[in-house]
Image (tube, rainbow, N blue to C red):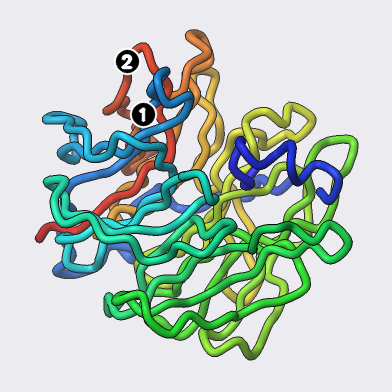
Amino acid sequence: MHIQPALIALLAPVLCFTSALPAVGSQDEVLKGAENGDIAFGRYDPALQGLSLWVAEADGSHQRRLTYDQANFSDWGPEGRLIVFDFTDDTGVHIATIDPDGGHRTTLTSAPGVQEAPKWSPDGNSIVYDGFPFPVDEANFAISIWVIDADSSDPRQVTRNALDVEPVFSPDGTRIAFGRITGDSPDGQLEAIYVINSDGTGLREVVAPRAGLEHPDWSPDGRSITFNIAPENPAAADSGSILAVRPDGSGVRVLQPATSGFKFFKAVWSPDGRRILSGCVEVKASIDRICTISRGGRINIIVAGAQRVNFPSWGPAD
């Protein structure tokens, strides 16, 4: 589910491709000059009954905690010097930025309701997110895509009258990919992938609705939109796999299949396009980890521990 757990009860009333792709990080996907920096992720805190924001080096070492309130989605600015994230308070879910050392936390949104899943524009001037206001209008409930300037000014609505979640800018900043929740099925929530121009024009479907589809991301070279099929959706043959599609909707394929040891979720690209950072369910232990996936499908656990982890993001070197 994309809607945050604390809101599920509130919103309850309204709410097989197998062709091969070249190995993750094939040469034509590597971005010249891009360098990988630190990662961010959420770690469960029993005192919060939710996740707080952490950062670490790219191999998972030198982990340090940034927030002591509940935080979920995060994304690194294009220069690696600022992280945008969403956090929960008594008025809903909002968006803030913070330095990688935990300093200079700045709240960007504060309207009652939900503003979540923020992503930077490639030039660092804007942030895209999804949201809806409180109180909830159950008869006309919608989740919309919004863009706001990085200084918190000029919020503008990009989509309307649907359930649109987890937007991400294309690498050139001209388009936004996002998930659109379209209903339910016996096999789980139905979601499609759409692309729209950043000014709100040119809406089109890229991947038709299917059960368990979630968490789109755009490859750094602009050639693919990736997503996963929910690990908890056993009816799908590709449950727990990472898939990819061209932005024009062609060439849907499995990028990284689930294995006997791991199922994957919330996969994001490294800045250089050589690796993928992903949530990974360690099947035998039945616990969520953070993994990297490199060429040839090599999987390395980089964040583990007794508490579950989630919402990975990978920043560039500053």
Residue at 36% x, 75% y is 152
Q: Label 1 neighbourhood size at 10 Å, few (<14), some (14-19), many (20+)? A: many
Read off the residue under disc 1: 43
Residue located at (40% from left, 81% from top): 173
Q: Which mark is residue 305?
A: 2
Looking at the picture, which amino acid does disc 1 mark?
Answer: Arg
Does residue 62 appear to the left or right of 249 in the view shown?
Answer: left
Q: CA distance from mark 2 to mark 1?
A: 9 Å
Image quadrant in which the C terminus is located: bottom left
Residues at badges 2 and 1 in contact (C-beta under 8 Å)? yes
Q: Toward the viewer: 182 or 149? A: 149
| Residue 109 image offset from top left, x and y in percent | 43, 65
Q: For residue 7, say whether it is visible.
A: yes
Query: 173 or 159, which is in the foreground?
Result: 159
Name the residue at 73% across, 34% down: 237
Residue drawn 55% across and 31% down? 258
The secondary structure type at the circle numbered 1 is strand
Other-residue count near label 2 (Cα within 10 Å), few / some / many at <14 / 14–19 / ≥20? few
Determine whether, in the image, residue 191 is placed left or right of residue 59. Answer: right
Give percent across and percent down for residue 56.
19, 37
> Three-letter amino acid code at disc 2?
Gly
The quadrant holding residue 122 is bottom left
Quick one: SS at disc 2? loop
Q: Is residue 98 above or below residue 240?
A: below
Q: Kindly indicate the quadrant of the structure image that contains residue 221.
A: bottom left
